[in-house]
Amino acid sequence: MRFLSAFLLLLCLLLAACVGSIRPQERHAQGFLPWTEEQSAYRFMPGDELDVKLIYNPEFSDRVIVAPDGTIELALIGPARALDRSVPELANELRERYAHELRRPELNVVPRQFGSELVYVGGEVQRPGVFKLVHRMGVLEGIIEAGGFLDTARTNQVVLIRRTSDNKPMLKVINVHDIIEGKARADENNVPLHRFDVVFVPKSTIAEVDLWIDQYLNRSLPFSRAFNYTVNRNSQGYF
């Protein structure tokens, strides 16, 4: 009788895991804006390297790196804030400040290296972490950079999170499995990554069921390991 009660409890938990499985939804995702492919102007972040070239006073030109506090240090006018400013915005401010020191303060701001070109890949991948965005990289390439999928990955519902120019998050769900299998056009579905994008690979339904079994049965009920193994193997054929 006790064994039957435990088995019924297991069945209920498996059904609950299937019904309550976390499935990312692109539409009406709470806290996320509708997805758009906006291309906003590049804004400087810490680690970026740039040239400030004074056209008529080249002796005061500088090559600088944006510091962790978001500033750059210029020989003639001292510190200036570059954080989150576009090239025209920074150039206009510097021109106004150089005008107090120079008769002809015309200048150009030229980005050289982009130390802030980073993306984040997490979830069910081999090596979750932060990766350099050094070339045209889509969601699939980002996952490959992180070592590829784990066996527990839900490859048809990979989540991409991006922030707008107003720092509001957007969410898109991508079927990477269909891209790999050639069932979807890679140029349309393998979304190119932008800096600071977050790629999250959720667990598969099977992995969630196994987690439920481990948390609520293996650690709570006095089943033998052989019985647990049989349940896990048998459960995989139903989801």
Image: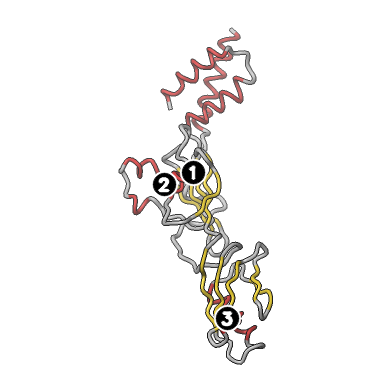
Q: Residue at x 58, y 14 (%)?
A: 6
Q: Residue at x 54, y 22 (%)?
A: 12
Residue located beneath label 2 in the image: 140
Q: Is residue 64 above or below residue 160?
A: below
Q: Nearer the viewer, residue 165 or 89?
A: 89
Q: Residue at x 30, y 43 (%)?
A: 182
**Do the numbered discs 3 and 1 sit on residues whose CB atoms are within 8 Å?**
no
Residue located beneath label 1 in the image: 146
Amino acid carrying label 1: it is: Ala
Q: Is residue 203 above or below residue 129?
A: above
Q: Quadrant of residue 83?
A: bottom right
The percent position of residue 31, horizontal first and vertical second, equals 57, 52
Q: CA distance from mark 2 to mark 1?
A: 10 Å
Amino acid carrying label 3: it is: Asn
The percent position of residue 143, horizontal first and vertical second, equals 46, 44
Q: CA distance from mark 3 to mark 2?
A: 39 Å
Q: Is residue 204 above or below residue 230?
A: below
Pointer 2 local density, CA inside 10 Å: few below 14, some 14–19, many at least 20: many
Ranked by sequence position, the earlier of labels 3 and 2 is 3
Pointer 3 local density, CA inside 10 Å: few below 14, some 14–19, many at least 20: some
**Do the numbered discs 2 and 1 sit on residues whose CB atoms are within 8 Å?**
no
**Do the numbered discs 3 and 2 sit on residues whose CB atoms are within 8 Å?**
no
